[in-house]
Amino acid sequence: MIEIKKDRLIIKPVSKVEGFYEPPPDKSISHRAVILSAISKGKSIVENFLISRDTMATVECLKAVGVEVSIDNASNRATIISKGARNFSEPECILDAKNSATTMRLLTGLFSSLPHLFVFTGDKYLVRRPMKRIIEPLTLMGSFIMSRSGGYPPLCIKGGKLRAIEYKMEIPSAQVKSSIILAGIFAEGKTVIYENGNSRDHTENMLKEIGSQIRVEDGLIEVSGDANIKGDFRFEVPGDPSSAAFMVAASVIAKSGELAIVNVNLNPRRTGFVEALKRAGADIQVNKKGMKCGEPFGDILVRSGRNLKGFKILKEEVPTLIDEIPVLAVVAAFAEGESYFEGLSELRVKETDRLNAVAENLRKMKVKVEVKNDDLLIEGKGFVEGSTLDSFGDHRIAMAFTIASLFAHGQSVLLNPDCIDVSYPSFFDDIRKIVSQ
Ligand code: S3P
């Protein structure tokens, strides 16, 4: 089924997906839970914290400014003891966000309110990702940020007293929005953000949960400066829908079986992929169970063996399934007929150019694919051929094409799968538990 060699996977086809499965903790919420705990004075606990390369980059950066963070690997619990954001110290070393744009963008916003010098770098993928989108609003607020030409990392931030701004977002990005919010809660006055589209709203929901001064209404977000957030929180992170999406897709493609997915975050700004798969003819049921971190969570049940047909993704819904496009493109290849994905420009500036990576890998699997500007057209035939594929150093490309390979005709090889650690270190263990011949 999946054999892990030094720098590659050898993947042999399976046909059944069956059992119970609990996805790993939500990555976006894990980042925010430790950041919000660090901002506030006191001792906070994050239960079901995701221990992965990205979230540990956030933890290390917070430690570098004097926050005490201890991680218990056995229980996935993070304990954070902080003197509050106003008392963060100036780091003595360069901060390394590794592969994590969430770490760099959110913490640049937060650190902008402090009178220290912060130097931020990342791995060879992150230093190619655009930071102008945060530099512009944070500079308007009074932060001084230097970057490599064109607005690329490394970044050098000299923060200080910030002023509130009114900002109309050009790009529908939760990272940009959160960066401004985290600067705004320490700025003087009321910061107003006019959202563009429905990007994930965890920062807003979690700030409301902890009683911070934030108002969200009809695409407008208002945060009051000088927030004096009291600590001693206990967050419980729900499962990550973006990680669960790979198993949902496997189940939807498989010929037989039934998969019950428990404890998944069901924030509608994250579950657009479920709606898209239903349009493709998938048999999926969603049951809400309660609230965690200010958001609904629950179970998802998928029944395999349905005939899949081509489906359309509209530009407006892209933010609600932004990280699921690669695996949805894989499902489209297994569907019969044409699928059309509109408005994918943001895919080009993710961990890799995901639009190009998806098209290249699908073509290697003998699928007819066309990229028209930022739109993607896939002519599904109901099957794909096994091939030699590349992860392009991107965790979600690696996982999406592991799923494609598991149901391909013949064996596949996936090069450079190590990047999966960024968001989902237990991916292969979890897959092995639910798939069979
Ligand atoms: C994230 C937001 C999204 C998403 C990323 C995580 C977050 O990025 O792609 O994986 O935690 O805020 P953008 O906000 O840039 O679209």
Image: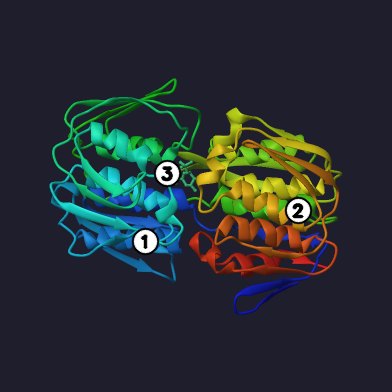
Tell me where residue 130 appears, x and y as whole percent: 41, 45
Q: Which sits earlier in the primary sequence, circle 3 or circle 2? A: 3
The residue lying toward the viewer, choosing from 53 and 261, is: 53
Q: Is residue 340 toward the left or the right of residue 72 in the image? A: right
Residue at 63% from the left image edge and 44% from the top image edge: 325
Tell me where residue 420 appears, x and y as whole percent: 55, 64
Q: Nearer the viewer, mark 3 or mark 2?
A: 2
Residue 57: mark? 1
- Which residue lies most toward the top here? 218
Q: Is mark 3 within 8 Å of ligand 1?
A: no
Quadrant of the image containing the C terminus: bottom right
The residue lying toward the viewer, choosing from 248 and 364, is: 364
- Which residue lies most toward the bottom here? 6
Q: Secondary structure at mark 3?
A: loop
Determine which residue is flagged by label 3: 293
The residue type indicated by label 1 comes to Ala
- Which residue lies most toward the front here? 149
The residue lying toward the viewer, choosing from 216 and 293, is: 216
The residue type indicated by label 3 comes to Cys
Q: Secondary structure at mark 2?
A: helix
Residue 363: mark? 2
Tell me where residue 231 appears, x and y as whole percent: 24, 48
